[in-house]
Amino acid sequence: MKALFERGTMNRFASKSGVFLLVVGLGFITELPSHSQSGDADEKTLILLQHDWAEARKKSDLAFLENFYAREFTVGNMNGFESSRAEDLAMFSSGDMKPALITDGEMKVAIYGQAAMVTGIEHVEGTYKGHPGQFDLRFTNVFVNRDHRWQLVRHQSTSISKQ
């Protein structure tokens, strides 16, 4: 009788463990980058948003930027400084930041449910507080999908040194 009890207990344990592992495994799978049809549409949308963001910065389109930036948006810029959403918007509204050319390349998109990451290389030419410059930057942008639209939460860029 003891062996039967132990075997029954083990079977229930194995069954419960199997269900637990299945649930955990499914949870993990949902965290992997999405490549479904909707993921493909989201990927195209995110690439288009990168282009639209570049155009908005060149035109100092504050309406676009205010809508595009999440309320908690922050920037880690190429000099290692942090900027808030308000500080970033102020650079464009004041005219301190005037990009003339922004091109993005080598972009990769990874979607994680309601969050996404876009990485790539950005070439920027323009002026900052009247001083001309041009930079090649490696960037990482983090997005969240809220109210059925993607918003930028974090932009991080690092200068690519010319060798």
Image (cartoon, grey):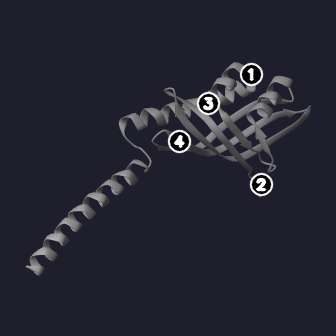
Amino acid on which disc 4 is placed: Ala
Q: Which label belongs to residue 144?
A: none
Q: How crowded is mark 2: few (under 14 residues within 10 Å), some or many (20 or more)?
A: few
Secondary structure beneath label 4: strand
Secondary structure beneath label 3: helix
Contact between marks 1 and 3 (CB within 8 A): the answer is no
On the image, which quarter does residue 161 sit in? bottom right
Q: Which label belongs to residue 51?
A: 3
Q: How far apart are marks 3 and 2 (CA)?
A: 24 Å
Q: Where is residue 68 in the image (x, y as percent from the top left)?
A: 63, 27
Q: How far apart are marks 4 and 3 (CA)?
A: 16 Å
* Residue at x 17%, y 68% (from the top left corner): 11
Q: Distance between the residues labelled 4 and 2?
A: 27 Å
Mark 4 sits on what residue?
116
Secondary structure beneath label 1: helix
Nearer the observer: mark 4 or 3; the answer is 4
Nearer the observer: mark 3 or 2; the answer is 3
Mark 1 sits on what residue?
59
Q: How crowded is mark 1: few (under 14 residues within 10 Å), some or many (20 or more)?
A: few
Q: 6 above or below 81?
A: below
* Residue at x 59%, y 32% (from the top left corner): 151
Q: Which label belongs to residue 161?
A: 2
Amino acid on which disc 1 is placed: Lys
Precedes in sequence: disc 1 or disc 3:
3
On the image, which quarter does residue 95 sit in? top right
Q: How crowded is mark 3: few (under 14 residues within 10 Å), some or many (20 or more)?
A: some
Contact between marks 4 and 3 (CB within 8 A): the answer is no
Nearer to the camera, 28 or 14: 14
Q: How crowded is mark 4: few (under 14 residues within 10 Å), some or many (20 or more)?
A: many
Nearer to the camera, 6 or 25: 6
